[in-house]
Amino acid sequence: MDIIEIDKAFVANTYARSPLVATSGSGAVIRDENGKELIDLGSGIGVNCFGACDDEWVNAVETQLHKLQHISNLYYTEPQTELAKLLCEKTDMKKVFFGNSGAEANECAIKCARKYSSDKYGAGRSTIITLDNSFHGRTLATLSATGQDSLHVHFAPFLEGFKYAPANDFAALETLCDGAVCAVMLEIVQGEGGVIPLDKDYVEKIAKLCTDKDILLIIDEVQTGNGRTGTLYAYMQFGLTPDIVTTAKGLAGGLPLGCAMLGDKVKDTMTAGTHGSTFGGNPICAAGALNILSRLDETLMAEVIKKGEYIKAELSCAKGVKSVTGLGLMLGIETERDAKIIAAECLEMGIIVLTAKTKVRLLPPLNIKQEELEKAIQILKGVIAQ
Ligand SMILES: *Cc1c(COP(=O)(O)O)cnc(C)c1O
């Protein structure tokens, strides 16, 4: 039996997988079991931000692997401590909680927002407003936070205390902000929802409303974070000072790590015993993240913006393309043909692209070589044009 057949027999059937068995890679190139090479415009889903097996990153992770792989969070390790310090220095956030994923980062944010409010105002101020078409994770709490009716099936009862507002409609959100609201949670660019950036003016108004009413502003940067949109975090382009920022996907360059960064108001809200994780922030993942974070500098961010503009310019007026949205190297392409069919044909043609809702989605490695990018975009253009 081949891998795909064995997978179908033994792995829970929760993914609509594409027929690629990935065995190795280097940079933006992924190899399958037959040695075929593909150019990767997905980075996992925005995870391998320096591509596959980047030398410096491998070295950083391997060095830590030979020192110590794990110790309980009841003790200290240098990589975790250094990573928290670096994240705070680069963001002006004050403290960091580490988990293993985006959903866990958001769980922490939800718990922290509710505790902040109950500490200060007592019970009954626990509602969190999120946006229609948002995506915040697959656990029951983060699924409840996710504003998509199609995902609110099968698993009832969902967690109470979430209300959903249509994106980019400030009046609608303001109406929902009654005395029971403790937080607003949003993605600056809705990723899974179809790569849709929020209007700057809308987000600014929300930030002001939140400050005025002592409602916490939680920015979900699980997908937009870690250089993906051309700044370290996307909220930085919007001039915001969030109360909580969550991130994961690209944070450790391919290892499972997520975190909730806590701002001034909530830096001491979570106390001993109120939250935890066995693996969160373990030294291996932290060492990987330290390497990634220290390399997301201005030069690289300028490259990300330039490559994003290149892709937009190539595709905006291309045959079969209706629109291109997104920021930096997080792009959604609305096509005349079905996006899933385009992605399947691309795979056959030797490039990996993702989809989001009805769009083709691109999240290439941040340091993809220009010639690889050009080659892949020409192939993609050809497939879209058919
Ligand atoms: C992927 C994603 C999540 C969930 O992250 P997991 O690591 O899969 O739990 C949450 N929020 C956003 C915006 C995401 O893109």
Image (cartoon, helix red, strand yellow):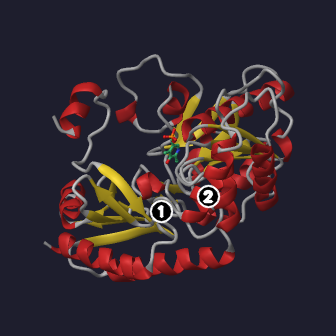
| Nearest to N terminus: mark 2 or mark 1 | 1
Q: Nearer the viewer, residue 63 or 87?
A: 63
Task: Say if 172 sits above or below 59 in the image.
Answer: above
Residue 212 is labelled as: none
For badge 2, the amino acid type reads Asn
Res. 218 image quadrant: top right
Q: Position of residue 26 (x, y in %)?
A: 43, 64
Res. 148 image quadrant: top left
Dot 2 alpha-carbon crowd within 10 angstroms: few under 14, some 14 to 19, many 20 or more: some
Compared across the picture, whether 355 is left or right of 59 comes to left
Q: Which residue is mark 1?
A: 51
For badge 1, the amino acid type reads Gly
Q: Position of residue 62 (x, y in %)?
A: 61, 51
**Name of the residue lying farthest toward the front:** 66
The residue at 77%/22% (across/down) is: 274
Residue 202 appears in the rendering: no
The quarter of the image holding the N terminus is top left
Task: Say if 63 sits above or below 25 in the image.
Answer: above
Q: Which residue is mark 2?
A: 59
Q: Nearer the viewer, residue 308 or 291?
A: 291
Residue 158 appears in the rendering: yes
**Name of the residue lying farthest toward the top:** 157
The residue at 70%/55% (across/down) is: 290
Query: Could you tell me how far apart the alpha carbons at marks 2 and 1 are, in whole angstroms?
Result: 14 Å
Compared across the picture, whether 132 is left or right of 278 comes to left
Closer to viewer: mark 2 or mark 1: 2
Q: Secondary structure at mark 1?
A: loop
